[in-house]
Amino acid sequence: MATEERAETTSPLDDVMEDIRRELVRRVAADDRDANRDVYDALEDE
């Protein structure tokens, strides 16, 4: 399986970089929601 193969070839550095990427995406999404709160609230009300 591709996921098993990828897991075998990742280094500790790859794992750390993936964690950093995930955290950056989470923070950017949270900042976007905060900056555009009125848009998100309007979409929830539809």
Image (cartoon, rainbow, N blue to C red):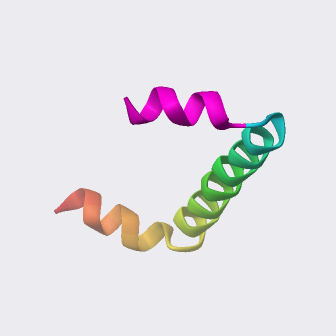
Q: Quadrant of the C terminus?
A: bottom left
Q: Quadrant of residue 7?
A: top right
Q: Quadrant of residue 45?
A: bottom left
- For this orientation, the residue located farthest to the right is 13
Residue at 76% x, 49% y: name it: 17
Q: Is residue 7 magenta?
A: yes
Please state if 37 lies on the left or on the right of 27 as rendered: left
At 41% across and 36% down in the image, what residue appears?
2
Give, as a single range, the part of the protein colored magenta.
1-10
Q: Is residue 36 above or below residue 12?
A: below
Q: Viewer-proximal residue, 25 or 17?
A: 17
Residue 40, position as x, y percentages in the image? 38, 65
Depicted 34 relative to depicted 22: above or below: below
Q: Residue furthest left?
A: 46
Question: At 70% from the left edge and 57% from the top edge, which residue is drawn?
Answer: 24
Left or right: 13 in relation to 1: right
Figure quadrant of residue 39: bottom left
The stretch drawn in magenta includes residue 6: yes
Q: Quadrant of the N terminus?
A: top left
* Residue 31 horizontal side relative to residue 6, left or right: right
Magenta-colored segment: predominant secondary structure: helix
